[in-house]
Amino acid sequence: QEIYTLTATMDGGANSRAQIVLNGTNTTKESFHWNEGDAFTLFQVPVQVEPGVYNGEITSHEFFISDAYSDNNPAATADFTTENPLTVGRKFKAFYPSPVMDEGVDNEFHLTLNNTLKDNTDESWIKYFKENMFMVADGSITETMGVSGLTFNHLCGIIRVTYHNESKEDRNISSIYVNGSWGTSYGYQLNDGGSIWESYGEGVHGISFQEGATVLAGQSKNFYILFMDSREPEENKLPLSNVRVLYSDKTEKRTSEYSKELPLFKPGKCYWLN
């Protein structure tokens, strides 16, 4: 059976990828890369042949990263393949990671952040970013699509909290929350005309750990919180503040607080708090 290939990259090239490089030392940017086993879904929409008349139906195509890609050689660009042929000339919108369609509603789905991790190991963070660092790409399929590829753009920003345990006791962190007017969910619906609407959810931005995250006495740990655009653009001008860290040591449960104003939301940008 014939295999169809698209080359997928990130807006920003080699310094903007799909999986964050943990514990980076450059405070001006984060680096990202694709993962073995990655997949995205591409939706093709009908072509308007005359006002109110569309040719074709909405079709979905799941692409899987090439078996040749290796995490040992991370890259910003990778080949993805499918066995489901694309229709030349039709527009598309692609989502990473592949979304789960809403039950009982045709061609509708939500991208919602799940900010619960097992613990603070690298494996848990890799899983967190792979499942939640949503990206989108759009354009039209042409005869050269397999050569020119498509470009994904971030939908999320990243808050990186470096927590310093200056006490003489180990601390087990159960959650970290940041106050701010940001979003936690996007909703998409492909209608008969092929267009897409977006809705935004709002909520508390934070992460929690099912088994806790230990920070040894006198040491530091990095934590990451993904967040989305807010419901109203002007709300993005409000600063984030009151970083709350809930932890426990040998004596009792406690909360640490730290405040800092952050600039306007920008997808793919990392806001580093120490």
Image (tube, rainbow, N blue to C red):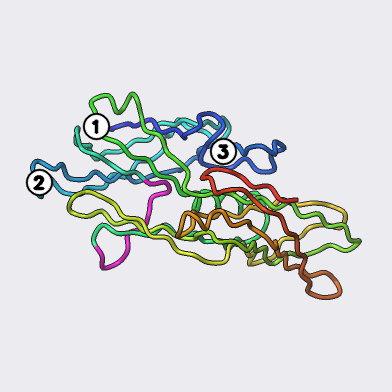
Which mark, by number, is residue 51?
Answer: 2
Q: Earlier in the sequence, mark 1 or mark 3?
A: 1
58 displayed left or right of 222? left
From the image, tell me which residue sits under label 1: 2
Q: Secondary structure at mark 3?
A: strand
**Residue 101 highlighted magenta (yes or no):** yes
Q: Nearer the viewer, mark 1 or mark 2?
A: 2
Q: Earlier in the sequence, mark 3 or mark 2?
A: 3
Magenta-colored span: 95-105
Q: Secondary structure at mark 1?
A: loop
Tag 2: amino acid: Pro
The location of residue 43, given as percent across then percent down, is 28, 46
The location of residue 244, given as percent across then percent down, is 71, 65
Q: Residue at x 25, y 33 (%)?
A: 141
Tag 1: amino acid: Glu
The Cα atoms of the two marked residues, 1 and 2, are separated by: 36 Å
